Image (cartoon, rainbow, N blue to C red):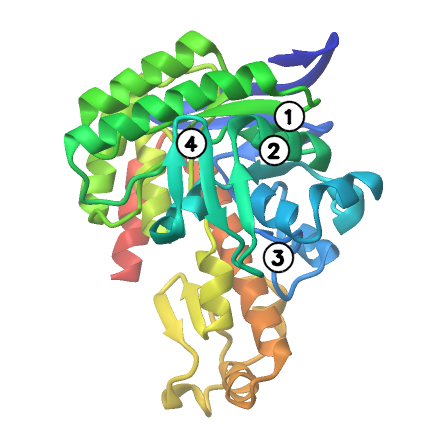
Amino acid sequence: MATRCGLTVMNFEVVATDNNARAGVLTLRNTEVPTPVFMPCGTYGTVKSLTPSQLHEIGTTVLLANALHLAIRPGHELIEQLGGLHQFMQWPGPILTDSGGYQVFSLQEKTKIDDEGVSFQSPIDGSPIRLTPESSMDVQRALGSDIVMVLDQCTRYPVSHANARTAMIRSMEWARICRDAYRGAGVLFGITQGSIYEDLRQESLEALTSIGFDGYAIGGLSVGESPDLMYDTLNRIVPAMPREKPRYLMGVGTPKDLLMSVHAGVDMFDCVLPTRNARNGYVFTSRGIVKIRNAAYKRQLEALDPSCRCYTCENFSRAYLHHLDKCGEMLASTLMSIHNLYYYHNLMREIRDSIERGCFLEYRDRIVQNWE
């Protein structure tokens, strides 16, 4: 339970386990969020091609937005003046904001990192930007985020043990500064770093727990390492994370990644994959991947996934979606994004159910076999 000014702002309860897999309930903004949960990415205050009401109908409970991008455009001060991010984007549910550490990482060729923060050029107009732990906390306070992420330094794989440790130590110091600097009403999550090195991950986790956070995230994975190496790292570090706090794997991933990560004990996920892939005609189904641009779908009257109950599958054929995509119609992105996010949310529902029934491993293996 996390409190601010005597008021409960977050509560997390594990209600069932199956080996390391956990089913729980995360309560934020008077909203009960069943976990494991997938959070769609609304980087600029919107999930591309979808309205807030569509997201709600699909089953979205928590959204992710990016504090750095919103600070650059339209500006966090303006959003605060207009009532905060919830009011600005008309999303009443919980919002998690990423600090911008990963975006700085993606621009690392043009980035200068020191112990106090990061200097880089705006991807919009090239103007100089200085991001520090303190400024990241102020931006997220202004946005009115429900879950606030500390500023961290991510390393690309492969990375030497020495360089990974330097970035991890810096991230832990920034985490401490963020903890001291944050003055908002949301809850603050720390982020473990250390690449694939178990000793660094353990050192990072010990540092974060000594500082004390409302939840704990795993950063610095899915950055070049193989899926098997990522799974191995998760299986070694996640079970050591505080059992009473939510565990969040950042920026991951495919449906198989979600299943394997839940097996390690992860509770929360985000990734651009379902919506980005949908915009490129790449659709997830219970039978595997459908690449709607393939000519084979031009005359197929069946739904994307006959076993799916989403709006898209209950109303439109593969042939129609193929046609929309070929014509470059915006509706193609909307309909396939609806399906992909519904698929992800439904996968989470089925995972939770299998954990509560004590048959998660059997469920995982059956689903993976269906894909293959």
When asked about the image quadrant of residue 285, the answer is: bottom left
For discs 3 and 1, the disc positioned in front in the rendered view: 3
Say which label, 3 or 1, has the lower sequence index. Answer: 1
149 to the left or right of 20: right
For discs 4 and 1, the disc positioned in front in the rendered view: 4
Residue 158 on image: x %, y % = 18, 44
Q: Is residue 295 above or below residue 228?
A: below
Q: Is residue 257 above or below residue 137?
A: below
Say which label, 2 or 4, has the lower sequence index. Answer: 2
> Which label was assigned to residue 47?
3
Q: Distance between the Cα atoms at labels 3 and 1?
A: 22 Å
Nearest the camera: 202 or 317? 202
- Residue at the disc numbered 2: 33
Nearest the camera: 15 or 35? 35
Q: At label 2, which amino acid type do we have?
A: Val
- Callout 1: few (<14), some (14-19), or many (20+) C-alpha neighbours within 10 Å? some
Q: At label 3, which amino acid type do we have?
A: Val
Q: Distance between the Cα atoms at labels 4 and 1?
A: 26 Å
Q: Are marks 2 and 1 in contact (CB under 8 Å)?
A: yes
